[in-house]
Image: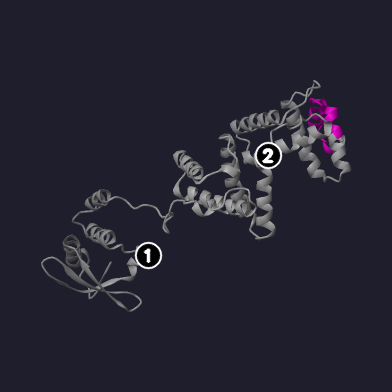
Amino acid sequence: MFNTLFYYPHVLARHCQGPSAQARERYLNHCADQGAACNTLLRTARELLVIAERLDLRTDQMISIRQVEAAAEHWVHYQEHRGRLRSPRGSRRFFIQTALRWLRFLGRLEANNKMPRPFAALIEHFALCMRDQRGLSEVTIRNRCWHAQKFLNWLDEQNRSLAAVSLQELDGFLSLQAAQGWGRVSIATSANALRSFLRHAEAHSWCAKGLAAGIDGPRVFKQEGLPTGPTWPDVERLLTSTRGDRPREIRDHAILLLFALYAFRSGRWPLYSLKTSTGTANSLLWHAQSSGGHRNILWSLQSARRSCAIFSRFGRAAQVERSF
């Protein structure tokens, strides 16, 4: 098989003389018999050589999944250090997948004796009902099952059963997530998932009635994801830094004042032009004409009144209309 895949003598010699050459060649022949394409065989052969160089197959000892994962991490780190890796995640996954398939073929993969997840049958039943009866998406099913499994794992650690769980324990679990750094949105998502799971559990008499209705997650505000604006002292420092006597500085200071005080949008600012103004001791009435034809009347505070008046007189050359 190596003679078929590789033409250059030094490349062929490296594969033929590398560790576990016969075992690698037997697996490649098996893949070819299964209908693998030439490019797939080439890629597999290269990966097998890397795996054989990092896993000790000279003895008859079984290889565990943990050993394969550790070897994959060492390989990815080595490639990253040499600047040869574009996708660490993809390289790690391909290493592990190829190694596990090869070791299974050789009968050298250690059996996975990992303990089953607590309440695994309940989670599977919950997922099946969401998929077949409610028609929910796989993303929603996976998300809700993850949160339900996390709660059940915690419940198992407390040596508690689902049949005896109480609202106090549910509140304690959510409070624990908050103490571990979860935000309000994450906790609310977990509460919603647990509410859905416990409704399902109540319907099948797995737990006491009324638990789902009693879960009270944190309130999530409509604009939760919007960034917080700067504090007013920060705004004052910005406004102070823009003061000056040049026309551009006068203009910028007036614009920033109106931005700060009236929440003008920067995208709409070029569409406004100042028509006329009338002033009193504490305020100034601006009549602004927008490109849409409607008029906007703005009452400005004393600081904005003074800046806009200075701009109107000195910031631009005398015109019929003065535009910002």
Secondary structure beneath dot 2 equals helix
Residue type, mark 1 in image: Gly
Residue type, mark 2 in image: Arg
Q: Is residue 313 left or right of residue 2?
A: left
Residue shown at 58% from the left, 51% from the top: 198
Q: Where is residue 170 in the image (x, y as percent from the top left)?
A: 51, 45
Q: Does the magenta stretch include residue 59?
A: no
Asked where in the image residue 18 lies, by quadrant, the reply is top right
Question: 238 or 176: which is nearer to us?
Answer: 176
Q: Position of residue 180 (x, y in %)?
A: 47, 38
Q: Is residue 160 left or right of residue 115?
A: left
Q: Give the range drawn in magenta.
A: 5-26
Secondary structure that dominates the magenta span: helix
Q: Mark 2 highlights which residue?
A: 93
Q: Mark 1 highlights which residue?
A: 267
Residue furthest to the left in view is 281
Residue shown at 87% from the left, 38% from the top: 30
Q: How far apart are marks 2 and 1 (CA)?
A: 46 Å
Secondary structure beneath dot 1 equals loop
